[in-house]
């Protein structure tokens, strides 16, 4: 056998064995094909051994055998490389599947967009954030759920940042498919290749619940701050009211406290005229009085005006009006009535440009403030009247007025006069004399009417009966007391009568007259006189009383005083004191009663005053 043929057959057999081995190890069908091919080639080689004349003829077959063997070798190397690539691809696919699962199951909405912002991919969580299903947003632009809460400049800055290759992070207010607003915590990052942006990835998280909680906390903090500021103003106002000694000081300080507070801008006090209802400011802070004309004109442009509504209802009125510059609707104000027990002292108007200043303040706070200021005004007016050396005397004619005592005089056709006002119940208790009517008739009338709570008969002398009556707050005496006025005389005979009152000349006389004429239609001012009040000192009173007593009356009173006759229990009886004076008990009693009568006359026989 020619060595060429032998080598060729050997190579082919080697190839068959090698290929069978690789087929067994790799189970790759290509090695099965090569095994068959080499087997047939070997078989052919064996069949041609006998017929071959020279080995030179088999040289091409030898070369083919060698190449085939190399093919098997290189195929095995290729399969190894292919297996390595497959392993790498499988590992990459596994990682990609893991990433996809992570994205699919992520609680945040994740979007992939092209460089123009068109959405190419959206995970299922997009529906929980936007309300749209993933298929609905593919091919759309995120503008689909813009809320309109951000301006063009905001989005322009966002795009400039991500187009430059930087990551944008922040909060967005979007609108869900349902139309409701939601707050989004978003991160938008560019995906770049060789410095060029290929895509954008956006991760959005719904933070609506957290944002609403933050807003609630912020709102509560604002409410607390506002209430603290308001309470501070009210505390300062109350402190100034205690220190103020005149009505002008009270109104000025109240205005100053509000105008100097951070929440408010302007405050002023004023009143309305009785005839035409014209509103006139008395004091102001935060501006000058001349600048209030346009504001007051705008405030009184409705019917009824806020000032009328506040005074008529005795409740604060919140409204909007023009600011001091004339800008419509720029000022928010509250009109607070200054009223105390039916007495009207005008209004306090507080203005602000802060639309939220009054939202968190309860109406009752301003209502209580109005009553407090009015109470303080009433107190200083009363104090001024009581302490004034100079008073204004006002004389009124009464005709058919609706007043408890006047109604009794008209009903019983009698004469009723007020002798004294005061007692443990204040101005509700009045001591009145009734002439031309029997005490029983008075008692029957009091039992029928609801304006007089009670009447106690004290005594009857020379056709005049004295009663201690308790009258409700709707009386002419109570009205005068509310304005710090005292009563010199009040007498009503039948349906007509006369009232003489006095008020400190420095007080607001107009408010007293207006209050009376507003409350009683049948009341007419017929005289106004200025007079000096008779001021009696303690020494003067003692001198006057000493001059009225006789020597024996003075001795009886002094002896009884030092002997403890007026103590309880008495140190000495009347009989013992009379024995000390060496007179009879009857004589002692006569002298003592006369002294007591003169003492009490000096104390009580004076003008009718409110104690």
Image (cartoon, rainbow, N blue to C red):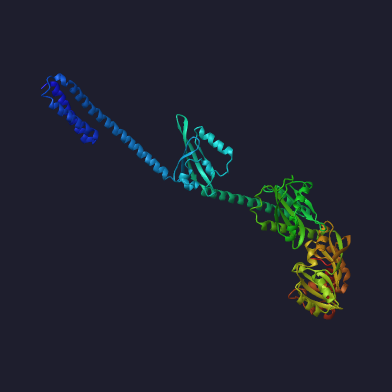
Residue beneath the point at 37% across and 41% down: 97
Residue 336 image offset from top left, x and y in percent:
72, 56
Residue 246 in view here: no
Residue 149 image offset from top left, x and y in percent:
58, 44
Residue 580 image offset from top left, x and y in percent:
81, 77
> Where is the C terminus found, in terms of image quarters?
bottom right
Residue 55 image offset from top left, x and y in percent:
14, 20
In front: 346, or 175?
175
Which quarter of the picture shows residue 88?
Answer: top left
**Height in image: 330 above or below 69?**
below
Residue beneath the point at 85% across and 60% down: 391
Which quarter of the picture shows residue 12?
Answer: top left
> Where is the N terminus found, in terms of image quarters?
top left
Horizontal side of residue 551 vs 223, given as left or right: right
Horizontal side of residue 395 vs 300, given as left or right: right
In front: 233, or 591?
233
Q: Residue furthest front?
A: 51
In front: 582, or 513?
513
Give the tally of numbered discs: 0
Residue beneath the point at 27% across and 30% down: 78
Residue 546 in view here: yes
**Height in image: 478 above or below 36?**
below
């Amino acid at each position: 056998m020619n060595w060429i043929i032998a080598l060729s057959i050997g190579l082919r057999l080697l190839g068959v064995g090698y290929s069978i081995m690789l087929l067994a190890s790799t189970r790759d069908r290509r090695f099965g094909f090569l095994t068959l091919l080499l087997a047939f080639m070997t078989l052919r080689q064996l069949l041609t051994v006998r017929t071959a004349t020279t080995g030179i003829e088999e040289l091409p077959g030898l070369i083919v055998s060698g190449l085939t063997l190399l093919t098997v070798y290189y195929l095995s190397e290729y399969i190894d490389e292919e297996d390595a690539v497959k392993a790498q691809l499988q590992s990459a696919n596994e990682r990609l599947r893991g990433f996809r699962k992570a994205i699919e199951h992520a609680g945040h909405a994740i979007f992939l967009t092209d460089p123009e912002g068109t959405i190419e991919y959206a995970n299922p969580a997009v529906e929980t954030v936007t309300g749209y299903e993933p298929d609905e947003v593919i091919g759309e632009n995120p503008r689909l759920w813009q809320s309109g809460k951000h301006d063009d400049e905001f989005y322009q800055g966002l795009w400039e940042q991500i187009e430059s290759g930087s990551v944008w992070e922040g909060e967005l207010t979007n609108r869900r498919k349902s139309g409701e607003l939601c707050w989004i915590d978003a991160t938008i990052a560019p995906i770049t290749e060789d410095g060029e942006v290929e895509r954008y990835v956006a991760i959005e998280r719904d933070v609506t619940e957290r944002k609403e909680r933050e807003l609630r906390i912020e709102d509560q903090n604002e409410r607390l701050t506002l209430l603290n500021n308001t309470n501070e103003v009210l505390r300062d106002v109350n402190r100034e009211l205690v220190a103020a000694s005149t009505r002008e000081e009270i109104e000025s300080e109240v205005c100053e406290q509000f105008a100097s507070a951070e929440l408010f801008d302007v405050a002023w006090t004023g009143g309305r005229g009785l005839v035409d209802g014209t509103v006139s400011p008395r004091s102001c802070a935060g501006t000058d009085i001349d600048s209030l004309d346009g504001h007051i004109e705008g405030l009184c442009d409705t019917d009824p005006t806020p000032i009328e509504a506040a005074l008529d209802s005795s409740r604060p009125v919140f409204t909007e009006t023009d600011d001091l510059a004339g800008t419509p609707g720029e000022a928010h104000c509250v009109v607070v009535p200054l009223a105390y027990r039916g007495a009207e002292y005008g209004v306090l108007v507080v203005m602000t440009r802060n639309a939220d200043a009054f939202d968190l303040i309860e109406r009752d706070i301003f209502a209580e403030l109005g009553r407090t200021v009015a109470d303080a005004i009433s107190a200083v007016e009363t104090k001024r009247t009581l302490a004034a050396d100079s008073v204004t005397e006002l004389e009124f004619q009464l005709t058919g007025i609706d007043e408890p005592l006047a109604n009794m005089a008209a009903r019983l056709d009698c004469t009723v006069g007020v002798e004294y006002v005061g007692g443990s119940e204040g101005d509700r208790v009045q001591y009145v004399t009734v002439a031309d009517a029997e005490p029983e008739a008075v008692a029957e009338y009091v039992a029928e009417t609801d304006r007089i709570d009670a009447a106690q008969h004290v005594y009857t002398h020379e056709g005049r009966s004295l009663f201690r009556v308790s009258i409700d707050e709707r009386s002419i005496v109570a009205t005068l007391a509310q304005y710090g006025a005292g009563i010199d005389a009040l007498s009503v005979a039948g349906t007509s009568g006369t009232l003489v009152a006095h008020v400190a000349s420095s007080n607001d006389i107009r408010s007293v007259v207006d209050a009376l004429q507003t409350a009683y239609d049948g009341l007419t001012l017929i005289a106004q006189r200025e007079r000096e009040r008779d001021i009696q000192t303690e020494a003067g009173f003692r001198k006057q009383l000493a001059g009225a007593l006789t020597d024996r009356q003075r001795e009886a009173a002094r002896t009884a005083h030092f002997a403890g006759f007026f103590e309880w229990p008495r140190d000495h009886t009347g009989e013992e004191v009379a024995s000390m004076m060496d007179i009879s008990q009857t004589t002692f009693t006569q002298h003592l009663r006369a002294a007591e009568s003169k003492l009490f006359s000096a104390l009580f026989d004076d003008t009718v005053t409110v104690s």
